[in-house]
């Protein structure tokens, strides 16, 4: 299994700036052969995010919700995706959409708390944040 990114151009940038924005959709796919020819089989849509949301340091919320969606989708696929595959899938996704740092997450949570608007349930840092590196793994 692997992640295939599909892109679609948009007319305006959602998070500042002007011009063309690109929406990226993360698709979980599997390569198989049909009649001797390689075919990519669609397994699941994992989540989507715009370039402007990835680039903007002001809007960590979009990245947090992207990672929340990805986590929910991968949890539903736990009977089809092994732990090793899941780790590889998440690493591939993180190359394009970085997880939140603790500083970004805390600032975003404080902003949400001070806002008069309701943005929905706050994803936990364990879901959308950068996982702690274990000393035993790095040796």
Image (cartoon, grey):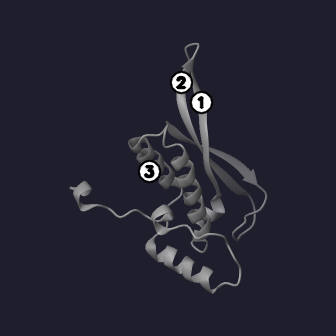
Please tell me which residue lies in front, 123 or 31.
123
Please tell me which residue lies in front, 24 or 65.
65
CA neighbours of label 2 inside 10 A, class few (<14), some (14 to 19), many (20+)? few
Q: Is residue 37 left or right of residue 16?
A: left
Image location (x, y in percent) of residue 23: 68, 53
Image location (x, y in percent) of residue 77: 53, 43
Residue at x 48%, y 55% (from the top left corner): 94
Q: Which one is earlier in the sequence, the residue at label 2 or at label 3?
A: 2
CA neighbours of label 3 inside 10 A, class few (<14), some (14 to 19), many (20+)? few
Query: Mark 1 sits on what residue?
Result: 41
- For numbered disc 1, what is the local secondary structure? strand
Query: Mark 3 sits on what residue?
Result: 91
The Cα–Cα distance between marks 2 and 3, rounded to whole angstroms, is 22 Å
Q: Is residue 17 left or right of residue 98?
A: right
Residue at x 69%, y 54% (from the top left corner): 22
Residue 99 seen in this snapshot: no
- 3 and 1 marks in contact (CB < 8 Å): no
The Cα–Cα distance between marks 2 and 1, rounded to whole angstroms, is 7 Å
- For numbered disc 3, what is the local secondary structure? helix
Residue at x 71%, y 80% (from the top left corner): 117
Query: Could you tell me how many numbered marks the image carries?
Result: 3
- 2 and 1 marks in contact (CB < 8 Å): yes
Q: Which one is earlier in the sequence, the residue at label 3 or at label 1?
A: 1
Image location (x, y in percent) of residue 121: 62, 69
Q: Which one is earlier in the sequence, the residue at label 2 or at label 1?
A: 2
Is 72 placed above or below 121 here?
A: above
Question: Which of the labelled discs sits on residue 32, or is there none?
Answer: 2
């Amino acid at each position: 299994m692997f992640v295939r990114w599909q892109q679609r151009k948009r007319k305006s940038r959602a998070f500042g700036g002007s011009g063309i924005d690109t929406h990226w959709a993360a698709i979980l796919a599997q390569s198989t052969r049909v009649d001797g020819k390689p075919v990519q089989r669609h397994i699941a849509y994992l989540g989507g995010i715009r370039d402007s949301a990835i680039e903007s340091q002001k809007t960590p919320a979009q990245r947090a919700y992207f990672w929340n969606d990805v986590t929910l989708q991968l949890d539903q696929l736990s009977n089809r995706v092994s732990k090793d595959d899941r780790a590889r899938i998440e690493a591939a996704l993180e190359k394009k959409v970085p997880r939140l740092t603790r500083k970004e997450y805390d600032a975003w949570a404080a902003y949400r708390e001070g806002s008069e608007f309701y943005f929905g349930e706050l994803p936990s840092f364990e879901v959308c944040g950068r996982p702690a590196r274990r000393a035993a793994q790095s040796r």
